[in-house]
Image (cartoon, rainbow, N blue to C red):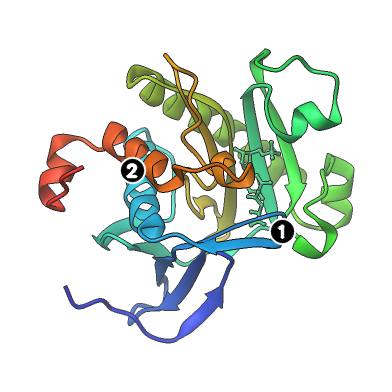
Amino acid sequence: MNLDKRNLLYRGKAKDVYATSHPHQVLVKFRDDITAGDGKKKEIMGLKGYYNSLISAKLFQILEDAGIKTQYLGLPEPGYILSLKLDMIPLEVITRNIAAGSLLRRFPFQEGQTFKPPIIQMDFKNDEYHDPMLNDDIILALELATREDLEIIRETTLKINQVLKDFLEERGLLFPDFKIEYGRDQDGNIVLGDEISPDTCRFWDSETCDILDKDLFRKGESGVIEAYQKVANIILDEKDKKKWNLDF
Ligand code: TMP
Ligand code: ASP
């Protein structure tokens, strides 16, 4: 496959964004770099970008099918996603269904406690300031988003949570929490961007409670790539696997 890949526009910690021949489309390369602690802990893990692109493409397609506006346009080949160009909003929108991770370090919740309705938390995407938690007034004062934007972001995020949680639970995965990011398209509409993968979500096996995401790397445990592969194997259907000649 000949990729429509022009100049590098942006290099993040785990993805590169390239211009394409189309002014409103970008090609996102999912790299094998894996980081934690604002990039302080860093490794290269073969096939991570490959699995994450397959997982993210599938989950974005499911959201598109559920009527959510996303930047996803297609997967030209594993490792690369073609996306609508967005002006990204530096907010990490985190949804929590089950208490885990930093929430347990910061607040007196019980491990495994469920949240109904889910908690939506917004952090400032800024490594220099260590992604601090925000509130609406700080978001408005920083001019990251308007009140109307925040309404749309909250409503869309709750819908995304419901769609993904239902899809994953049907396949034997718990979905304790996840982080998403939004951007604005050329008309100023708020659109879901970035990725949804084991780098940005918690996925637990609902029978064994095994961790199947980047927490393994954060904790220095083994089996990171095997976990990502397992998630891909669980969420991709036979058609996807045939198309990409995948033999997990
Ligand atoms: P936390 O419990 O560490 O705050 O993480 C909440 C969710 O956000 C979890 O699903 C992992 C994801 N996440 C990111 O995508 N990027 C980050 O930098 C961090 C810290 C968490
Ligand atoms: N995304 C952050 C980093 O790369 C931290 C994390 O995911 O734990 O440093």
Q: Is residue 60 visible?
A: no
Identity, as a three-letter code, of the amino acid under mark 2: Gln
Q: Which numbered dot is residue 229?
A: 2
Identity, as a three-letter code, of the amino acid under mark 1: Asp
Q: Is residue 225 left or right of residue 220?
A: left
Q: Which numbered dot is residue 2?
A: none
Image quarter for ligand 1 equals top right
Q: Where, by quadrant of the figure, is residue 4 drawn? A: bottom left
Viewer-proximal residue among 222 and 158: 222
Q: Is residue 162 left or right of residue 236?
A: right
Q: Residue at coordinates 74% horizontally, 41% vertically from top-left? A: 122
The CB of the residue at mark 1 lies under 8 Å from ligand 2: yes
Viewer-proximal residue among 190 and 81: 81
Identify whether 117 is placed above or below 204. Answer: above
| CB within 8 Å, label 1 to label 2 | no
**Structural distance between the alpha carbons of marks 1 and 2:** 24 Å
Identify whether 97 is placed above or below 10. Answer: above
Q: Is residue 98 left or right of residue 72?
A: right
Q: Earlier in the sequence, mark 1 or mark 2?
A: 1
Q: Residues within 10 Å of mark 1 (few under 14, many from 20)?
A: some
Question: In the rendered image, which residue does mark 1 sit on?
Answer: 38
